Amino acid sequence: MRNFNVKVNGVQYLVEVEETTDGAQVSSQTVTAPVAAPVQPKPVNVGAGEPVKAPMPGTVLKLMAENGTAVKRGQVLFVLEAMKMENDIVAPKDGTFKAVVAKGASVNTGDVLGTVE
């Protein structure tokens, strides 16, 4: 048996490999990969604006408005992917938009995505 360190998607694994000769049959063994601990979001200072929160866990696919732009109530601010579906997250009121998260961010239910002041 030989041991190798293998890195897959930034996670390092220790793998044992058995050498065989002449096509000898060997039994297979399933290796369970370690699971990385979820990243806890940092506290966000949302200021005086009304927070726009994630209604479900997911990934921010798109930011539909730029920071500092005027938005109208009901305007789509973010597209959130959750369970293979795209969900529009809209402005709760008229005001000036400020994003707190970036495209590609993973969020949990209740995380602040941005504010409308």
Image (cartoon, helix red, strand yellow):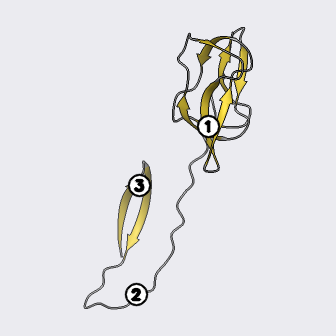
Q: Earlier in the sequence, mark 3 or mark 1?
A: 3
- On screen, residue 7 versus residue 29, left or right, reads left
Callout 3 environment at 10 Å: few (<14), some (14 to 19), or many (20+)? few
Callout 1 environment at 10 Å: few (<14), some (14 to 19), or many (20+)? many
Task: Indicate the position of residue 17 as horizontal and vertical percent values.
Answer: 36, 73
**Identity, as a three-letter code, of the amino acid under mark 1:** Leu
Query: Is label 2 in contact with label 3 (beta carbons under 8 Å)?
Result: no
Q: Earlier in the sequence, mark 2 or mark 3?
A: 3
Q: Quadrant of residue 2?
A: bottom left
> Measured along the vertical axis of the image, is residue 57 above or below residue 92?
below
The residue to which callout 3 is attached is 8
**Identity, as a three-letter code, of the amino acid under mark 3:** Val
Label 3 or label 1, whichever lies nearer to me, is 1
Question: Which one is in front, 42 or 64?
Answer: 64
The residue to which callout 2 is attached is 26
Callout 2 environment at 10 Å: few (<14), some (14 to 19), or many (20+)? few
**Identity, as a three-letter code, of the amino acid under mark 2:** Val
Task: Identify the residue at horizontal 41%, vertical 66% (top origin).
Answer: 15
Secondary element at tag 1: strand
Label 2 or label 3, whichever lies nearer to me, is 3
The residue to which callout 1 is attached is 80
Q: Quadrant of residue 42?
A: top right
